[in-house]
Amino acid sequence: MIRCGEIIVRGFHIDIFSHVNNARYLEFMEEARWVVIDKYIGLKRMQAKGIIFVVVNININYRRPASVGDILELYLGLTKIGGKSAVFYQEIRLKGTETVVADAHVTFVFADKNTGKAVKIDDEIKRLIGKIKI
């Protein structure tokens, strides 16, 4: 898996129970996916191909609460790639530890930007995202 950055938990990430709200973890994971898209595929390449990145399913596990001041590290790896869909495995860990705060399997497709319909993942994209296969 690759490290996609870190996030310092701020007050606006917290809910009334004094820990990170579940919806924020989805945003943190989305940030990691954008890092990977930028680094391994490139938004300009996707625009030239007329495709967009679309999440179609997320299965997330909340393992441990995170609180204000915690520093969270974002990790991501590719676990599966098929004809039209692929799956990332993502983890959010407490910085400097192996403690997983949340993890998820995220199924996604590349879709035609005009129709929104999933398209075959071409060999170039497979090669590029295949670099992060775990």
Image: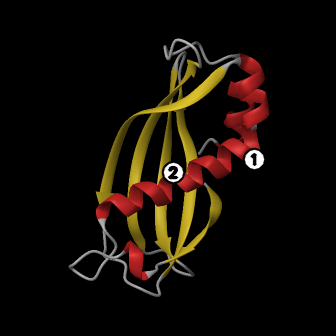
Which residue is more in the foreground, 38 or 61? 38
Provide the residue designation for mark 2. Answer: 30
Amino acid at dot 2 = Glu
Instruction: Characterize the local packing of mark 2: few (<14), some (14-19) or many (20 or more) Cα atoms within 10 angstroms.
Output: some
Q: Distance between the residues labelled 1 and 2?
A: 14 Å
Residue 45 lies in quadrant = top right
Is there a contact, CB below 8 Å, between mark 1 and mark 2?
no
Provide the residue designation for mark 1. Answer: 39
Image point 40% across, 82% down: which residue? 11
Instruction: Characterize the local packing of mark 1: few (<14), some (14-19) or many (20 or more) Cα atoms within 10 angstroms.
Output: few
Quarter holding the C terminus is: top right
Q: In this view, does 35 lie above or below 125?
A: below
Residue situated furthest bottom in the rendering: 69
Going from N to C along the chain, the mark reached first, 1 or 2, is 2
Which residue is more in the foreground, 66 or 133? 66
Image point 58% across, 48% down: which residue? 33
Image point 40% across, 75% down: which residue? 12
Quarter holding the N terminus is: bottom right
How many marks the image carries: the answer is 2
Q: In this view, does 124 lie above or below 114?
A: below
Image point 30% across, 57% down: which residue? 61
Residue situated furthest left in the rendering: 17
